[in-house]
Amino acid sequence: MSRTIYVIGNSHLDPIWVWRLREGRSAWLNTCRSVVRMLKKYPFLKFSRSSSACYKWVEACDPELFGEIKKLVDAGRWELVGGWVEQSDTIITPGEVLLRQAEHGKRYFMDKFGRDVRIAYSVDSFGQNIGIPKILKAGGFDRYLWMRPQQHEKEMPHLFRWRCDDGAGSILCCRVRNAYCTQPHQSEAEFRKWFALGIAGDDDP
């Protein structure tokens, strides 16, 4: 049986984790410039990125670059994900805060790009709140991409439906396999083996 595999590039960036705001903003601007150059050079590439706050930086600091990103979004080559203002901790953050993040973030993406972002995205929270499906549905999301807990921390399918604890539906969830990057010690053979297991081992939603 043949399968079609889609690979979409992503740049994971915590904009103010260990940097001053100026440095984080500069790193994100330089990332966007590099990605735009690559997408122009290689027409088959696609890219995705979350967080309305980061797009606001581009809009304010480099309007020309922001215009290039808008063109790529319109062309279907730059995917807007994670309609929050910024990726958040999803364990201790109150649900009301996450709902406000969705309200402001999704409004920005709609105003600037004409897109309703439906894919929630939190690849670097250190765990998940049991109320996340209900919070996401209330915030206007129907899919969720996340990473932690990883397989060695809690065994579960990598693709599944997470039901709301009040019975109000479910969210289609995809957990990133093997973190969001390959490690220097990982061989190509190891990567191919894990990738094959990821395809064969996932349950249908």
Image (cartoon, helix red, strand yellow):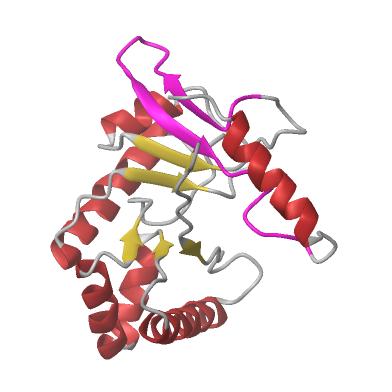
* Residue in front for this viewpoint, 68 or 27: 68
* Residue in front for this viewpoint, 14 or 159: 159
Which residue sits furthest right?
185
Splitting the image into 4 quarters, where does residue 197 fall? top right
Question: Magenta segment: does it hold 129?
Answer: no
Above/below status of 59 relative to 117? below
| Residue in view at x 39 percent, y 59 percent | 51
From the image, which quarter does the C terminus lie in? top left
Point out the stretch of residues depicted in magenta: 156-183
* Residue in front for this viewpoint, 28 or 181: 181
Which residue sits furthest top?
167
Give left or right: position of 67 versus 93.
left
Above/below status of 183 relative to 195? below
In x, y percent, where is residue 184?
80, 66
| Residue in view at x 81 percent, y 60 percent | 187
Secondary structure mostly taken by the magenta-highlighted segment of the chain: loop
In x, y percent, where is residue 23?
56, 82
Give left or right: position of 25 versus 135.
right
In x, y percent, where is residue 177?
63, 43
Question: Magenta segment: does it hold 157?
Answer: yes
Give left or right: position of 173 versus 66.
right
Above/below status of 55 relative to 122? below
